[in-house]
Image: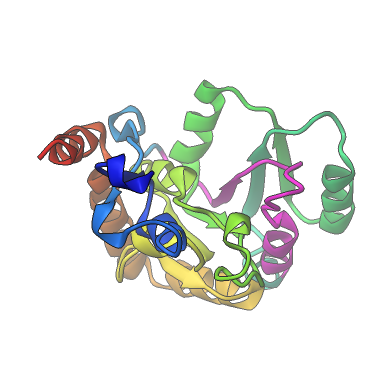
Amino acid sequence: KTLFVNKFVYNSAFTANVHENHFPKNKSFVLYPPIDVDNFRPGNKENVILSVARFDSPSHPKRQDVLIAAFKILHKSYPDYQLFLAGGSHGESDTLLQLKSQAGDLPVKFIVDPDFTKLKSLYSKAKFFWHAAGYEIDEQTDPEKVEHFGMTTVEAMASGCVPVVIGKGGQKEIIKKGTGFLCDNAQDIAANTIDLIKNEKDYRETQQNALERSRRYSIDSFNSDQKKILK
């Protein structure tokens, strides 16, 4: 049946690589999702680290527990920072309750089911964006458990947040050298964030690079890439 298919369209090179074990490589086409980057703006930045991901996603865990572990390390040196964990949840899920217990007295704020206006406000004030989906996952054997692309990462970058994420799946395509950090574990996440907190100049440069990088995934870029499918 693949003889009658002109193009297999994938949302990232990572996704393409997974499916090319079954479908012709010469028919692959990567079309990144369109992100309305113009709808996001950096605001007055505060000492806030933000993560945006569902709390109850059993088939694709977002691993906010890893972020709390990283924040515990960072908090020892920078107690004036806060960690905001935003995401959807079906009520007080077991995962959410466990995360709140793990956070204990740390300055960790849980924002459950925020609307889009609230999300944009959180992005605008956060200095850093953390994400840990894919932690300790073998992306070759369990590709469905990592981020195939990473839309929230792009939204954060467009809002002037420096991304510090687990380096699996599509995240590796979004974040290039000088635009953020790809990490292996909680220690890496904390250490890379601390390095930029210590060096304001490096932070500003990385922030600007991240902003510019987010343009690659704009609606205009999507429309331009989409036309290439027809060639």
Residue beneath the point at 60% across and 55% down: 144
Which image quarter is the C terminus in? top left
Note whether residue 37 is visible.
Answer: yes
Above or below, 136 relative to 3: below
Is 1 left or right of 188, judged from the image as shown?
left
Above or below, 184 relative to 15: below
Q: Is residue 70 magenta?
A: yes
Q: Is residue 69 magenta?
A: yes
Q: Position of residue 134 (x, y in %)?
A: 61, 63
Is 156 left or right of 190, judged from the image as shown?
left
Tell me the magenta residue range. 44-72
Q: Position of residue 164 (x, y in %)?
A: 49, 63
Q: Nearer the viewer, residue 135 or 106?
A: 135
Which image quarter is the N terminus in? top left
Q: Position of residue 34 (x, y in %)?
A: 32, 35
Q: Nearer the viewer, residue 22 or 222?
A: 22
State the image quarter where residue 207 is shown: bottom left
Residue beneath the point at 67% across and 45% down: 85
Residue beneath the point at 44% across and 43% down: 151
Above or below, 38 relative to 69: above
